Amino acid sequence: MFSIALRQLYPSDLTAFLKIHCDPKTTQFNPAGPYTPLRATELLQTWCAHWQQHGFGYWTVTDAEQPEQVIGFGGIMRKKVGHLDGLNIYFRLAPTAWGKGYASQIALAALDLAFTELKASEVLGLVHKDNLASRRTLERAGFVQFTTLNDAADNEPSLIYRALPGSAAEPKA
């Protein structure tokens, strides 16, 4: 069913993490632009700490046939999104992994975890209004636009999407 594998994120994923998060192509809609290596390293540490504290978090995404090949990161994590505090969905893939349905697979797996195992009441997704690919991915997974967030000075507000239990799309066989 899935052509990707999802596993816990580890500090040893740093090289792939830096390659993806410091790439201007993958961060073109990030209000702050590409991460610096220091900021990306700190982010990885924060995400690994979330795994330790909560037992889940953003995954390392690999090719199911070649699990040593990291193609991205994504999933859900507890995070404050503006004034809302809850589960946030995230996906960032290497450019070579774009257009293959991997983000949709991450989104469906994340919603399954959120609603089936964690019994969450909602999952939020923060997206730049011009990031049409991510917006389509969220909408296909069952998210609807909920509100906006002024998350960066001198930029237009980002969109906050929300998925509720029962709104998630069914995985395709």
Image: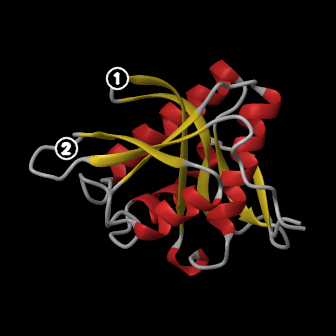
Q: Answer left or right for 21 relative to 149.
A: right
The percent position of residue 74, horizontal first and vertical second, equals 60, 51
Question: How many neighbours does mark 1 have within 10 angstroms: few (below 14), some (14-19), or many (20 or more)?
Answer: few
The residue type indicated by label 2 comes to Ala
Q: Could you say which is closer to the camera, residue 13 or residue 79?
A: 79
The C terminus: image quadrant: bottom right
Instruction: Please tell me whether mark 2 sits on a helix, a strand or a loop.
Output: loop
Is residue 9 visible in this depiction of the protein? Answer: yes
The percent position of residue 82, horizontal first and vertical second, equals 33, 29
Q: Answer left or right for 30 relative to 81.
A: left
Question: How many neighbours does mark 2 have within 10 angstroms: few (below 14), some (14-19), or many (20 or more)?
Answer: few
Identity of the residue drawn at 60% across and 76% down: 97
Identity of the residue drawn at 36% across and 63% down: 27
The residue type indicated by label 1 comes to His
Q: Is residue 117 above or below residue 53?
A: below
The percent position of residue 14, horizontal first and vertical second, equals 54, 52
User: Mark 2 highlights which residue?
Assistant: 152
Marks 1/2: CA distance?
14 Å
